[in-house]
Amino acid sequence: MSDRPFRLHDTLTGKVKELIPLEPRHLKFYSCGPTVYSYAHIGNFRSFLTADLVVRTAKAIGWDVTWVSNITDVGHLTMDDMADAGGEDKLEGALRSKEGERFHNVWELAEYYAAAYLEDWQRLNLTEPDIRPKATQHVREQILAAESLIKSGHAYETSSGVYFSVESRPDYGKLSGNTDRESLIRGARDVVTDETKRDPADFAIWKKDEKHLMQWFSPYGWGFPGWHIECSVMARAYLGDTLDLHSGGEDNIFPHHECEIAQSEALTGKPFANHWLHTRFLLVNGEKMSKSKGNFFTVRDLLSQGTHPLALRYALISGVYSKQLNFTLQTLEDAKRHVQRFEKALQLAESAQGDGPNVFGDSLDDLYDQALEAMLNDLNTAVALAKSIEGAKQITKESELNAASGEAAARFLDQINRLLGIVNSDYEAVAVKVEEAKPEPKADAAWVEAKIAERAAAKKAKDFALADAIRKEVTEAGVVLQDHPDGTTTWSVD
RNA sequence: GGCGUCGUACCCAAGUGGCUAAGGGAAGGGUCUGCAAAACCCUCAUUCAGCAGUUCGAAUCUGCUCGGCGCCUCCA
């Protein structure tokens, strides 16, 4: 089982190919994290979830994984086109915006959004990476890289900064297919403002800027590092010259990853990454998410509206990463039902007792195996989830389980949870937070309790017409009553 | 203009050369529980945007047409 091939799409070759770690059974993986200038939206998390699923799948076949996922907290510019880095730093921009007013400085802003990001990460039940480097903690290495690139002739200094010479890398464009020089330059022309560059397509490694809110001293004076060099440097620092796998969103293909490749390979003379994985965009109601279209969802927005975190997770992985996924509120509703089914199955497994044979035989083991197989086949989450649900249905089909069956069910659910992260029962902390964020119930608890008692009395007297009238009354107040076999009634706010 | 990707039922979404086109939601019918909820059972695409072609055989390959979406410009 440990030698089953793990097949993934590779952007560099455009094909699905086997993922083969340089060091057998030890995956060295770098995934691009967020720029912490705002709350992460659900599209950001779709791509982080792809990385999480790669790691889970690799571990499921017994591989060791060293996973590095960075946090970009400086240098990602709003006008950072293929070339110029002529815009303003995203973090500085955010500080000047309305939401930024509450922060004293850009460092505080970065720290705040980085913490929010980690909170979202945990709520959506992503695996914790081995290392989470921040760009600001690796400025020294970035300066050293700039010096080295200048020395080898791949970069040059001008009055405004240090630029990478695209011309020095004949294979520049191999990842994105943007190899047409004319079109590259034409694309750049509109936004290029820096006349000091030798070639419009050259991109910044270091920007000289004495007014920047985050600045460091370098051989080129005060300034800050370019966005692309951050990832090159951090990946190398923790994973070595050649990575087994590098991932990000599809928009990272160009310019970000293209530039990383150029810099890293110029620095080391070795291939930067053997496998490139990119997650397609998440669409909302058939369109790309954007604030202006009003279809923009952050993770916290949805969770604070009472969405179950695992339902959101389920919804975001319900389609394969290699195709655009259309997210709608209906998708979320559907996902909620699945999560409830898993919860129900888990309860059954936990309350199992008594003698008897395992009623499931090998069927649950087979389903888990099929789910794993689907994940090994280019992360086919849709099929893996279908198999998981089939297993959950087999479990919930039973009204109660004996000990042997309960053990089999618990093992299945645990395996599925480790693979897909959708059955986690250890969710109290999150659940409480979400509960707190819910709007106040329209009906007060004492009133509902009184109504329940009234209804119980009516039921006892077999006055079902009155009992139904009471149910109707509380329903209209937005309260849902649920009767249990033991005669008790619980309620929840709809 | 350059590069790319997709078009499968009411909705979401697998399948990418060959048994009856996964799975879920919704909907309809049923079992069960006084009712409701949950759970369970049944039904729900002779058909895969359109046209032409390759093939013994195509949703799956090729060509064209139409349409969606994306990157090249801030974005995962």
Image (spheres, rainbow, N blue to C red):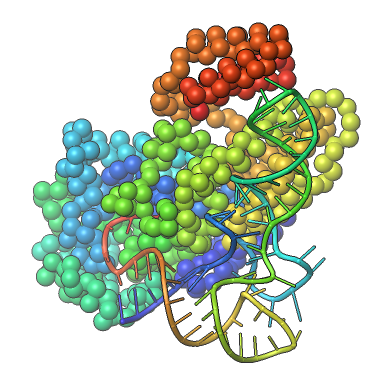
Seen as rendered, the residue at the extreme right is: A356
Q: Quarter holding the N terminus of chain A?
A: bottom right
Q: Is residue A337 left or right of residue A207?
A: right
Q: How many marks?
A: 0
Instruction: Measuring from the top left, give residue A380's x and y in whole percent.
Output: 60, 58
Residue A62 can be seen in this image: no
A416 w.r.t. A206: above or below: above
Seen as rendered, the residue at the extreme front is: A465
- Of A245 and A424, the residue lying toward us: A424
- Of A27 and A291, the residue lying toward us: A291
Instruction: Measuring from the top left, give residue B55's x and y in whole percent.
Output: 71, 89
Instruction: Measuring from the top left, give residue A492's x and y in whole percent.
Output: 54, 23
Residue at left offset 53%, top offset 24% = A475
Q: Is residue B13 left or right of residue A85?
A: right
Residue at left offset 69%, top offset 50% = A387
Q: Quadrant for residue A79, please give it.
A: bottom left
Residue A161 can be seen in this image: yes
- Of A476 and A431, the residue lying toward us: A476
Residue at left offset 85%, top offset 38% = A359
Instruction: Measuring from the top left, give residue A177's x and y in whole percent.
Output: 39, 75
Residue at left offset 76%, top offset 45% = A364
A276 w.r.t. A92: above or below: below
